[in-house]
Amino acid sequence: MVTVLVIGASKGIGLETVKAGLAAGFNVRALARSAGSIGVENARLTKISASAMDGDAMAKAVVGADAVVMSLGVARLFEKVTLFSGATRVVIDAMRKASVRRLIVVTGIGAGDSRGHGGFVYDKIIFPILLKRAYDDKDVQEMMVRQSGLDWTIARPGMLTNGPAKGQYRALLDSKDWGAGSISRADVAAYLISEIATPRHVGKTPELIN
């Protein structure tokens, strides 16, 4: 049975990934500071209350996993952000030591070489005002993932929405196709779990939109 470690599992895409992983029959390890608050109970779910920056906790959580999903978020958008790169350093180190190779990281449209592809309103208003500090650190995160030597995929969702998975999302690989679009958190989670079950985009950076 597949075992997946979800980092940032208490809400948003991370929580949806926990649910999707359980629905797919996976063993799921859900790591978050507030993992105890996760309102899901299942014999195949292990809740790990720890920071993504806790090297000792991460080293234990990774052992025996078949794949690791990172879906972290920050609340303070107007301060300097180092969580993404810092946690990624911890995760990569733990995975190397435990010989776990499959890593899927959620960043977003506007990270790395997708910057400037989100459409006029996103690129000129939303991104510079609200997201730039976080995405500057996501740029560093993506570089670290690319250089990790692991079997990685970087998933870049468009504007996130709530609601159930529709199963009609698109994973756009060609930068010529990247652009404005939205996707539900549940559909992002569905993609992440499908990519663990059947890897198609190892070494790729798909934009995810409905």
Image (cartoon, grey):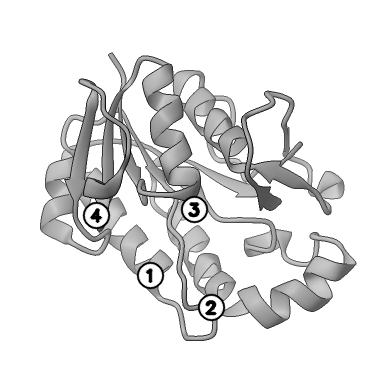
Mark 1 or mark 4, whichever is nearer to me: 1
Q: Secondary structure at mark 4?
A: helix
Q: Is residue 115 visible?
A: yes
Whichever of callouts 2 and 1 sits on the residue coming sooner in the sequence is: 2
* Left or right, residue 68 beside residue 57: right
Please name the residue shown 80% across and 77% down the image.
125
Q: Secondary structure at mark 2?
A: loop
Cα distance, mark 3 to mark 4? 14 Å
Please name the residue shown 67% across and 48% down the image.
161
- Which of the labelled discs sits on residue 146, or is there none? 3
Which residue is labeled 1 in the image?
83
Mark 3 or mark 2, whichever is nearer to me: 2
Which residue is labeled 4 in the image?
93
| Residue 199: percent from left, percent from top | 51, 24
Mark 2 or mark 1, whichever is nearer to me: 2
Cα distance, mark 1 to mark 4? 15 Å
**Marks 2,1: beta carbons within 8 A:** no
Whichever of callouts 3 and 4 sits on the residue coming sooner in the sequence is: 4
